[in-house]
Image (cartoon, rainbow, N blue to C red):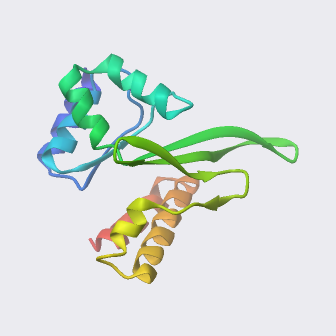
Amino acid sequence: EEILQRCFTALRYRPDILVVGEVRGREISALVRAVASGSGSTTTFHASSPEEYEMAVRNLLPRDLYTMLSLNTALLIFVSRIRIENSLARRIWKVYERVNDEWREIYGPENDSIYTSYILKRLSRRLLIDDIEADLEYRTKILMSTQQGFESVEKLLKKFYRV
């Protein structure tokens, strides 16, 4: 209940993106509200395929809210533990994007490359490819900084939003 209230409080500040660490219950309604209000949202689920994700969401939401969230979910990123040399590490395992009503794999570990992305292709009609790549590299840097602690993330986010 407390996390749900925090999500609704955060939405009053009209964030660009609402981040919820993990959705297990009623807090998913805050994500649906974020989508409905035009804010972006990101969260984690325990699922190993697009089908498992959709089943988890379907079990948490009434049908109309499930449909709205499902249609507004653009990407699914799956992380897995893998062995690198003598230790376990987390690594992006698969990335799917929604094209029309279907999930299409755009990244797989087989050759460690990104396949043609419909979303990036659509963005490139309005933005220069170099600008998109620079933005993605900067966002990658922000994500990588999470390994170094909150202060480095805060510094990069302030720079990103020019606060």
Q: If the image is split into quadrants, where does the C terminus sit? A: bottom left
Give the quarter of the image for residue 82: top right
> In x, y percent, where is residue 84?
81, 47
| The one of 84 and 114 positioned closer to us in this rendering | 114
Asked if 102 appears above or below 40 in the picture, the reply is above
Give the quarter of the image for residue 23: top left
Q: Residue at x 22, y 21 (%)?
A: 63
Q: Residue at x 82, y 42 (%)?
A: 87
Asked if 55 appears above or below 81 in the picture, the reply is above
Q: Residue at x 42, y 32 (%)?
A: 22
Q: Give the left or right position of residue 6, taking residue 20 as reference.
A: left
Q: Residue at x 29, y 74 (%)?
A: 162
Asked if 136 appears above or below 6 in the picture, the reply is below
How many numbered discs sit on the rendered protein? 0
> In x, y percent, where is residue 11?
17, 43
Residue at the right extreme of this rendering: 86
> In x, y percent, where is residue 96?
50, 47
